[in-house]
Amino acid sequence: MKKIIAAAVATAFVAPVMAADVTVSGDLEYVFTKFEGDGNATYVHDQDLKIAASEEADGFAIEAYILNTSRGGTDSAAGQVQLSNPQFGTIAIGTDTSHAINAIDEVADKAEFEMGDSNPSIASTGDDATNVTLLYTLPTLVDGLSLMASYGAADGTNDAGSDDEYAINGYAAVFSVGGVSARYATSSNDMNSYDTTYTAVSYSNGPVFAAYQVSNNDGAANTDTTGVSLVYNYGSGNLYTEQQTIDTNGSEANDSAVGISYKIGGANIYIQRNSGDTVADNGQFVGVEYAF
């Protein structure tokens, strides 16, 4: 992460700028993929660039960032502003702000490439960068307990209709003691006649990490997803495996991944194999990512 002197940034503007600590960070990831049955080898790429600023004022820590992302040639931009202090808690708002349920998920998503389908889906547009979400994390009331609430608003149209104007409400709780962490969250979307729930537990002890998570979506598709992961940190990287089951109206689809990663400074190199119930789920992947 590079530090940029605030005075240098201020000279780029006519109006004076508050003295803030500004940083630039990002990551790049490139993956060669070979799915069985399609006869082709290809690659995917992922690039992120983040500009962040922070300062202390009137007892509050203030942080803000702009994130530019490129996924396979599709570019998008998002951002967030956050204020926090020990008595008030933390409030974050932006187009990159997570709903409460997404702020605590992915605990079992440890595969380097793909997988992660057991993470809860709010709605097809629930996490769209054009929507604004407010996430409030309460101050610490009990050691090890974290409580969150969120409100999201879609980018609707000022018209007489309501089909493109909706809100998403969510709540989440995380309780950790020793190496054990338990998580629960729920989300309600005006577009849906059902709630999405997420439950997870994880255990960490030295180089060993294990996690189990379940998300339930009782909509028309009635989809329940389960994820399990196991990671062993051997010092220079990880040995990992992840399995997931997607149950849609009683019909199950199973996928699994196993891989090894190796870190050199800010670079992470990995080799992974996926397998599933269909040929399209099977493949081998070699990737490299670098964070700065």
Image: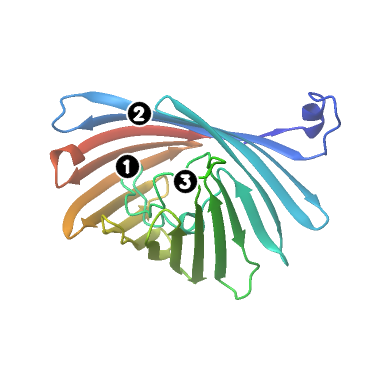
Residue located beneath label 1 in the image: 114
Residue at position x 13%, y 31% from top? 37
Q: CA distance from mark 3 to mark 1?
A: 18 Å
Badge 3 marks a residue whose secondary structure is: loop
* Callout 1 amino acid: Glu
Residue depicted at x 50% and y 61%: 170
Do we see residue 185 in this rendering? yes
Residue 100 image point, x, y percent: 51, 58
- Specify the quadrant of the image occupied by residue 5: top right
**SS under mark 1:** loop
Tell me: residue 85, above or below residue 281: below
Q: Are marks 3 and 1 in contact (CB under 8 Å)?
A: no
Colour scheme in the image? rainbow
Q: Amino acid at mark 2?
A: Val
Per the image, the residue denoted by label 3 is 127
Place of residue 183 in the rendered image (x, y in percent of width and height, measured from the top left) = 44, 67
Among the two numbered marks 3 and 2 on one chain, the one whose residue lies closer to the N terminus:
2
Disc 2: which residue: 44
The answer to whether 51 appears left or right of 166 in the picture is: right
Question: How many marks do you count on the picture?
Answer: 3
Question: Could you say where residue 282 lies in the image, as x and y percent from the top left?
Answer: 18, 39
Of label 3 and label 1, which has the lower sequence position?
A: 1
Q: Residues within 10 Å of mark 3 (few under 14, many from 20)?
A: many
Residue positioned most to the bottom: 142
Q: Residues within 10 Å of mark 2 (few under 14, many from 20)?
A: few
Mark 3 to mark 2 CA distance (whole Å): 22 Å
Using the image as rendered, state which of residue 184 and residue 257 is in the foreground.
184
Q: Is residue 292 visible?
A: no
